[in-house]
Image (tube, grey):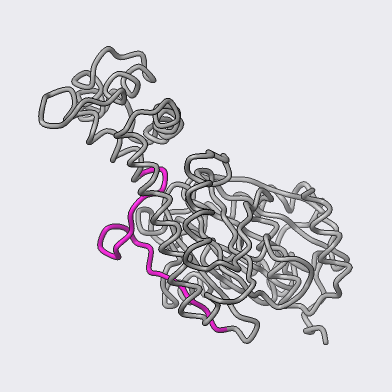
Amino acid sequence: MGVNRPAAPAAVLAVDAGNSKTDVALIAADGAVLAAGRSGGFQPPRDGVEAAVDVLGRAVAEAAEAAGLPPLRPGSPYAGQVAACLSNADFPVEERRLADAIGARGWGAATLVRNDTFAVLRAGLPGAAAPRGVAVVCGAGINCVGMLPDGRTARFPAVGTISGDWGGGGGLAEEALWWAARAEDGRGGPTELAVALPARFGLGSMGELIEALHLGSLGRRRLHELVPVLFAVAAAGDPVASAIVERQADEVVALASVALGRLGLLAEEVPVLLGGSVLTAGHPQLNGRIVAGLAQRAPRARVSVVSAPPVLGAGLLGLDALGSPPGAHGKLRAHFG
């Protein structure tokens, strides 16, 4: 049975907001994508909730203009349901605060907020069935969620070192820098990372790279460029780089296995979905070790990489909330290929 919403030009306003970018899509009741918009990264811990929601607003406004919608007016939302999957929404209290802030903008008649990892989980699950599976996202950071059809979830705080996290693009870059710095100054063993990392920026030594990062002539936002270098050095057989990659794989296996265990799914045939830029890049050394590790811990798990954009998952969650028919889900999936 569908859920009644006040009449609006779109059925769903889907929002996927990560640390580096925000994507939105206005979706019709039949699953057709009416328009899309994009804006910058969503970081309420740094910018504050209202300023972060302003970033979402720029993407929403772009999509509304592309769809030819009139200016927003009280009581005339753009969509019946806002489905927002957001980075930095790591605790239920944060989801509620963000839902209140987004709801106050009047973009939709109803607002659903989830952590952005749920977008990858929903995008990777077929049809319009209730979600059952686990997703691990390894992009700028790392996170994992699992869900059962009855709504029970397994999730992690995923707020960095204080919550036991390790890895993601930022963590991998810092780990590679740590080993490379020690290799150059003699505190650690040799690694090709000491040459390859500074070379990525046209520098001749780790000393130059450390100075550039410390003094700000090289912005720390560019550290993500070191992640492909790490994987290339590891693939060439460097033991230090390989150990970092293997540790990242083991972290993914640990997250997925714990989530599966909490939900009673370790012995079940269940999808384990991998998303985020680090995992979707398809590095054989990383992904192969993840598959092998899960084969030992959860032998019936079906591991796959979700290449569809996470905004698809947000859109599907919105259609779920409205009780939309399976055909709408299929049409939306077809749009994102």
The picture quadrant where one finds residue 24 is bottom right
Q: Is residue 199 left or right of residue 53?
A: left
Is 281 situated above or below 321? above
> Residue 133's spot in the image, x, y percent?
61, 71
Is 70 situated above or below 133? above
Q: Is residue 169 magenta?
A: yes
**Residue at x 51% of width, y 80% of height:** 263
Q: Is residue 188 left or right of residue 292?
A: left
Classify the position of the N terminus by image quarter: bottom right
**Residue at x 61% of width, y 58% of height:** 303
Magenta part of the chain: 152-170
User: Depth check: 234 or 117 in front?
Assistant: 234
> Residue 78's spot in the image, x, y percent?
74, 64
Q: Is residue 100 left or right of residue 321?
A: left
User: Depth check: 95 or 174 in front?
Assistant: 174
The picture quadrant where one finds residue 231 is top left
> Residue 260's spot in the image, x, y percent?
51, 73
Q: Is residue 47 magenta?
A: no
Is 80 situated above or below 244? below
Q: Is residue 49 left or right of residue 122?
A: left
**Residue at x 46% of width, y 31% of height:** 228
User: Depth check: 102 or 246 in front?
Assistant: 246
All told, the count of numbered labels is 0
> Residue 21's spot in the image, x, y percent?
54, 46
The picture quadrant where one finds residue 148 is bottom right
User: Depth check: 231 or 299 in front?
Assistant: 299
**Residue at x 36% of width, y 13% of height:** 202
